[in-house]
Image (cartoon, grey):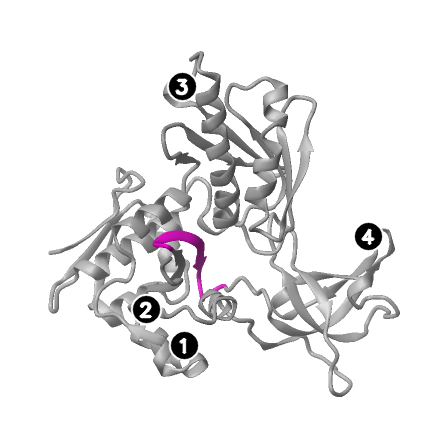
């Protein structure tokens, strides 16, 4: 069994982190330092309003953000106007603010609302979870930061991009709804505001009479379902429609689903609904990947990907041009630091908006 390996790919406006176990992607994170997720951040906040029906209170944080502090995590006994030292324990998602927990302060706290410290980013969290895993990064700045926290011997600076074609393809797949299954078939993953719907498609087996092949496909599918839920940071209610099985055989898949879910402490198998859907529930902690990337893939995500590709192709002294849809150009101009980071590494970049440029056709070239 190969040792775990943590890869950190840094590009203008974005940091992508991959955990490989036996050369297979087992954890994936896309972080944008200009607007960090906030998990683990420590704040001084002001209790803005009690919410007895919700069992907690709303706390005003720096920057106009509001978080929710449950009574069980420190709101009980406090009144409006109190200053509190709180940490973010669940990232903001789905239009809802972050979840908070009170943290004891060494002395009484007072305003104004302010950020005291940032929580660890994905490389540091994974380094703590896998203390024997080496880290490999293609950014000198990132390498210096990680070496200061983890030690020089654990972090290696790569002269070439740390994501090979296989890892890049795996991240590209996470941005879309479809996942190919080993041996045939596919998953279709569709988050909605209320729940996540996952459909198992039998592919070439659809309509066939080989019940054993159908069951084997679905057994493989449940393990990939659990893996994709983890990779995409999906949470809340999750319903899985297995491929072409009667109710009795669907129930027979529950032990396999429970085995697959056992690797994820936040994932729980609830059972089977009256319609034969496997019902799962996952604790909300991180921002789901589809919210980070936008679904369908946002103009900002397409623009940052173009900068990443362009940086790898840039040559010293070249006059570079980015051809992209006007929405992509506007998103990059509005995103703090992305264009500046690119220019610092590759030289001046001219934006050339093209209303006819389709998603995925963004291009940086020398003129």
Q: Nearer the viewer, residue 207 or 331?
A: 207
Magenta part of the chain: 22-35
SS type, badge 1: helix
How far apart are the two marked residues, 4 and 3, measured between alpha carbons?
Answer: 48 Å
x and y, in percent, of residue 17 in the image:
40, 61
Residue 54 is labelled as 4
In the image, taking residue 79 as reference, residue 41 lies left or right, namely left
In the image, taking residue 138 as reference, residue 65 lies left or right, namely right
Which residue is at a point 43% across and 39% down the rendered structure image?
Answer: 296
Residue 205 is labelled as 3
How far apart are the two marked residues, 1 and 4, measured between alpha carbons?
Answer: 40 Å
Q: Quadrant of residue 151?
A: bottom left
The mark closer to the camera, 2 or 4, is 2
Which residue is at a point 41% across and 65% down the rendered structure image?
Answer: 336
The mark closer to the camera, 2 or 3, is 3
User: What is the crowding at mark 1: few (fewer than 14 residues within 10 Å), some, or many (at least 20)?
Assistant: many
x and y, in percent, of residue 303 in the image:
33, 52
**Residue 274 is at least partly visible in this image:** yes
Disc 1 designates what residue? 146
The answer to whether the residue labelled 2 contacts the one labelled 1, judged by CB atoms less than 8 Å apart, is: yes
SS type, badge 4: helix
């Amino acid at each position: 069994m190969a040792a775990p390996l943590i890869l950190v790919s840094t590009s203008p406006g974005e940091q992508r982190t991959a955990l490989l176990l036996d050369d297979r992607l087992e954890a994936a994170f896309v972080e944008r330092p200009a607007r960090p997720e906030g998990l683990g951040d420590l704040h001084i906040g002001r209790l803005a309003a009690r919410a007895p029906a919700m069992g907690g209170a709303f706390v005003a944080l720096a920057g106009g953000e509001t978080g929710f502090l449950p009574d069980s995590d420190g709101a009980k006994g406090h009144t409006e106007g109190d200053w509190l030292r709180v940490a973010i324990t669940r990232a903001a998602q789905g239009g809802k603010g972050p979840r908070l927990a009170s943290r004891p302060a060494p002395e009484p706290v007072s305003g104004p609302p302010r950020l005291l410290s940032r929580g660890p980013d994905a490389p540091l969290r994974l380094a703590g979870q896998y203390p024997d895993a080496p880290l490999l990064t293609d950014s000198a700045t990132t390498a210096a930061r990680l070496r200061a926290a983890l030690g020089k011997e654990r972090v290696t600076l790569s002269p070439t991009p740390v994501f090979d074609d296989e890892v890049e393809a795996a991240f590209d797949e996470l941005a879309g709804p479809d996942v190919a299954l080993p041996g045939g078939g596919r998953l279709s993953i569709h988050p909605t505001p209320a729940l996540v719907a996952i459909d198992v498609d039998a592919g070439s087996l659809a309509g066939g009479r080989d019940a054993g092949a159908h069951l084997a496909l679905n057994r493989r599918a449940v393990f990939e379902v659990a893996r994709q839920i983890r990779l995409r940071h999906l949470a809340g209610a999750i319903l899985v429609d297995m491929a072409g099985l009667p109710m009795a055989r669907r129930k027979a898949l529950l032990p396999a689903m429970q085995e697959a879910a056992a690797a994820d402490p936040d994932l729980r198998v609830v059972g089977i609904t009256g319609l034969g859907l496997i019902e799962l529930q996952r604790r909300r902690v991180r921002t789901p990947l589809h919210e980070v990337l936008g679904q369908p893939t946002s103009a900002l995500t397409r623009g940052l990907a173009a900068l990443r590709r362009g940086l790898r192709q840039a040559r010293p002294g070249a006059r570079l041009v980015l051809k992209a849809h006007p929405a992509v150009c506007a998103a990059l101009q509005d995103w703090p630091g992305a264009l500046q980071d690119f220019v610092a590494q590759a030289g001046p970049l001219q934006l050339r908006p093209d209303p006819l440029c389709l998603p995925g056709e963004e291009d940086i070239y020398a003129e």
